[in-house]
Structures are given as structure tokens and as C-alpha cells.
Amino acid sequence: MDNAICLAHDIATEETDRFPPPAHPVPRAQSIPYGRPPMKIVTGTEMQTLDRRTITEAHIPSAVLMERAGKGIVRHLEEHCGPARGKTITILCGKGNNGGDGLVAARLLCRRRARVRVVLLAALTDLSRDAAAMYRRFVHITGRSAVSRFRSYDQTRGLVVSSDILVDALLGTGLSSEVSGAYREAIELINGAGKPVVAVDIPSGIHADTGALLGQAIRATLTVTFGLPKLGLYVGAGIDHAGTIRIVDIGIPPAYVDAIESRTLLLTSDSAFQSLPERVPSAHKGTFGHAGIIAGSVGKTGAAALAAHAALRVGTGLVTVATPSSVNDVLEAKLLEVMTMPLPETKARTLARSGLDRILAFIQARTAIAIGPGLSTHPETVELVQSLMKHLDRPSVLDADALNALTGRVSLLTECKTPPILTPHPGEMARLEVDATTQSVNADRIGTARRFARERGVFVVLKGARTVIARPDGLVAICPTGNPGMATAGTGDVLTGMIVGLLAQGVPAWDAACAATYFHGSAGDLATQHLGQPGMLARDLIAQIPYALQRTKTT
């Protein structure tokens, strides 16, 4: 079975009295202490170890694994590009087992009545044992006329540009040196053809562990990878080169996977949906918690509104926003289902330190708290946020200006009685880290998030392409959902609202961070299906949250 990898008045006190917390615990997903682990992400070496154990210890022949890989390629090619029948598909094969996988796919595509052409980049005598066997099986049903040797860019160009689909089966996960010679020419030819490209296991020219570009690499439309996801597909240049990623189960025994000590996981729809609380028939709005959001300032009420709407859309029973008094009416005009609480403010119309006692009472009356969206960096507001750290005794999210308030004062995080979830973008992460820059954070997103979570005892959601979630014990998860259309103002506020919404419903911090991030990306993916990427707004993402939460298939 394929594991497709596819994640609006100051009556707040009265409402709390009217709908007190339920006598029974808030329903939550069944979970082990930190929740059910998603799928492990492995390095090239770890995957090679799994393959070897499967062959030598489980006694599953390598040819069988190759056959399963080929079937997975064909299945996902057709799901992504439509039926193969009648299409001209050219498969460029290297000499190793990656090429063997491509040759299996070639044979199976012939059976699907595709017009298949194979281009070999190696002499027959240089093919690996399994690749040679698959070559013989292919020519047995097609004849040798379906196979040609790659001689040069110019001599092969006509074959490639006349194809409907190209399959990259050139180089696998073992590549560690820069691509050169005929392989580089072939990659340049494929990339310049303007055709859909299906990469086998990993786009040729991408390092399986680091995602680094090894001179030149395939820009795939679809990558079909085998066994377990490879780290290089989710970091570095691999993000831009992999396209859509699909994972094929080729039969690696679960016990062998369990033995791999990977501390990096891939979020899946299964793990995300398992984190959602049960909606029992007897539930009322108090059952699903009361989220408090401390946010907003003059000119920035939108951030507070987006976070509040998102918290409701993810299933929270009640949401109240605490905001500066002079912008309270503006915020109320934007919110219908959300309550607000006006608080003392500075002359700059930001939250004032004199409101500390009221904010502390606000926190105590809520199930979970989010602090930061649109707060501003006014010195008095910064002092206020810093003073709140030692009072955070319940699940909480720190975002945006709450993170900026901690610049140079990160040690205050150790005063939190309950480990908070931090949701920085790379620039905010750089301001929290000593001697870090946005560039250094992006160069090592996993390492940065893992190190900060460990050192500060917090949960970190490092936003960006393939958002990274880290927890205090060093475990890291990568989110496969989301797209560049989400690179627009306000989507981070939406994520904050979704996380605090799940926290308010009783979902544990790790599960809430992972599930909210996954569904945040899924909602963004749904929005772009309707609107495209350039014109998408954060509010469009919020509108898609209910649909992202409807489980129609495993992705």
C-alpha cells in the first residue's frame, strides 16, 4: 500500500461564568506522551541499510523491491499526469538500481499501452546486476528498437522534446559528488524540454541528506520515492527540485524501520487527524475550550482578527481577544463570533504595562493563550510581554511581537511554568539566537530549531518552506503541506490561531503544533487550487480550514 505523502465585548468574564470549563476532561486524541510519531525521514545511508537488511535478513530479493518500486512509479505517474495510454514517455536510465527502477516502470508502462522509449546513459556491460535483468525483461517485450544510448545533448534532444512525459531514473540516493559529463548534459536536456518530469526516488543531482545541488539537478514535477522519505527532499535545494512527493511502500519490515534511530519525522495526514479531539454528541461550546489571544495595536488589528477567526475555524468553543482599548471598537467591527476585552494602553495605542493585573486575570480565565500578533514593539508593551513569561502556567503560543520582545531576553523562557510553543519565521529566529542571521537559520533550519528547543525547553515551529517543528527532547518533524501562495501577510497569524485553538481544546503541545501546521498548509493548498498562488490572501486560507479538517483521503 502506498503511503502517500502527500496536516470573529467586554463580556468575557460573564461568558466564562456562563460556560465554565466542563467537569470532565476536554476530549483529546488518544496519544502516547508526545503523540503517535509520524513517518521517519532517513538519510541515504539509512535507506541503504534498510534495503540491505530487507534483502539479507528478510530474504526479499532485490529484484522484488525493484519491481514494487516500478509499480509505484507507474501508479503515481498516472495519478499525477493522467492515464499513460497513448502517451509518449521517455525514461532516461543510469547504470545503477535507480536505472533499474526506471526499466521496470518502462516495462509496466508498455503494458498500460504507452509509447515507451528508454535512453541509457551507460553501456549494457556497465549496468548493475538487477538493472541488467530489468533491461532484458524490457527488451523481451519491446525489442531493442525501444532503447537507445545517450550520445550527446544534440543527438538526444529530438527524442526528449517530442515526449509527453519524461522520467528521470539517472542517479539515486548514493550520489555525493558533482554531476558531470553525459549525466549533466542529460539533466540539462530534461530541464530544458518543458515537459512533466517524474523523478525516481530523488531528483538526480540532489544530495539525499542535505538537499544540496550537486552541480546540476533535475527539476521534477513529481518525485516518487521508495520505502521512507529522504531528508534531501525537504531541505535545501531539494525543496525546489522535488515537486510533488509521493512515497511508495516497497515492503521494508516495520521492525527494521523502528531500529533506525532517526530523530526527524515527516508529518502525515494520519498523524494530524489522530490529534484532533473527538466531537462527542453531548458537547457544548465550553467542551472545546476558551482560547485567549493577547494581540493588536493601532494599525495592526488585522493580525488579531485573523488569529481569532482561525482559532474558531479549527474547532475552539470560545475565543476572546485582549487588545488596547482605543482599537477595541475597530476589532469588534471585524469580529462577530469572537469576544474582545479592552485593556489599558500607551499613548501610542499599544498595550500598557499598567494592564498587567487585568491580563493576568484574563489568562487565568482561559484554557490556552496566544500572545503576539500585531502587538508592536513599543518599549512599554515589550516590558509587559516580558513580565508575562513567569505567569504562563497553561498551554501558550508566542508569536510575532511576543518573540521580538524576547530579543536579548530569551532566558525569560525558562520562567514559563508550562513550556510554550514559539512560532518564529527565520528573521525572528535569528533575533532570538545568539550570533545568528536569517541566512544562517535558513542554511540549517532543522539544526537551529532542534538546538533552540533543547536549550530553552520549548516547542519551536520554525515557519517557512517545509516548516520545521521541534520539541524539547530534540525530536523534529517536517511539514509536507503548504505552498508559495502562503508567503503573504497574515498567514502566520492564522497559524498562531490554529495552534492556540487546538491547545484550548486540550490537544497536547506537540500534537497541537504538528496538527495545526499540517492543516494550515493543507488549507493553503486548497485555497491555491481555487485562486492560484499569487492572489491568495490569509483570509482565503481561513475559509479553507473546515475543508482541510474533513478527512476524505490519506495524503
Image (cartoon, rainbow, N blue to C red):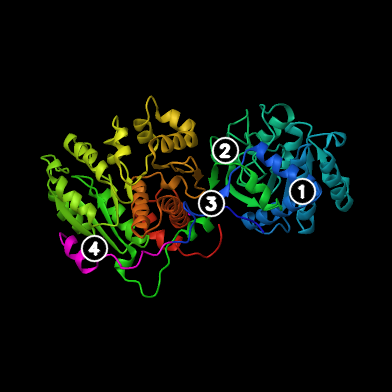
Q: Which sits earlier in the primary sequence, circle 4 or circle 2?
A: 2
Q: CA distance from mark 4 to mark 2?
A: 43 Å
Nearer to the camera, 287 or 405: 287
Q: Which residue is mark 3?
A: 37
Residue 116 visible in the current orientation: no
Q: Can you tell which of label 2 and label 1 is closer to the viewer?
A: 1
Q: Residue at x 63, y 43 (%)?
A: 260
Q: At numbered mark 3, what does the secondary structure look like: helix, strand or loop?
A: loop
Q: Which residue is mark 4?
A: 336
Q: Residues within 10 Å of mark 4 (few under 14, many from 20)?
A: few
Looking at the image, residue 338 lies above or below residue 372: below
Q: Which residue is mark 1?
A: 66
- Looking at the rendered structure, the kind of residue marked 2 is Gly
Q: Residues within 10 Å of mark 2 (few under 14, many from 20)?
A: many
Left or right, residue 403 beside residue 508: left
Q: Where 171 sits versus 224, above or below? A: above
Quarter-of-image position of residue 435: top left
Question: Does 9 appear in magenta?
Answer: yes
Give the residue number, with chain letter if any, for mark 2.
238
Labelled pair 4, 3 in contact (Cβ < 8 Å): no
The magenta region covers 7-28
Q: Residue at x 26, y 41 (%)?
A: 389
Q: Secondary structure at mark 2?
A: helix
Magenta segment, prevailing SS (helix, strand or loop) = loop
Task: Name the front one of labels 3 and 2.
Answer: 3
Question: CA separation, marks 3 and 1?
Answer: 28 Å
Residue 498 sits inside the magenta stretch:
no
Of labels 4 and 3, earlier in sequence is 3
The amino acid type of the residue labelled 3 equals Pro
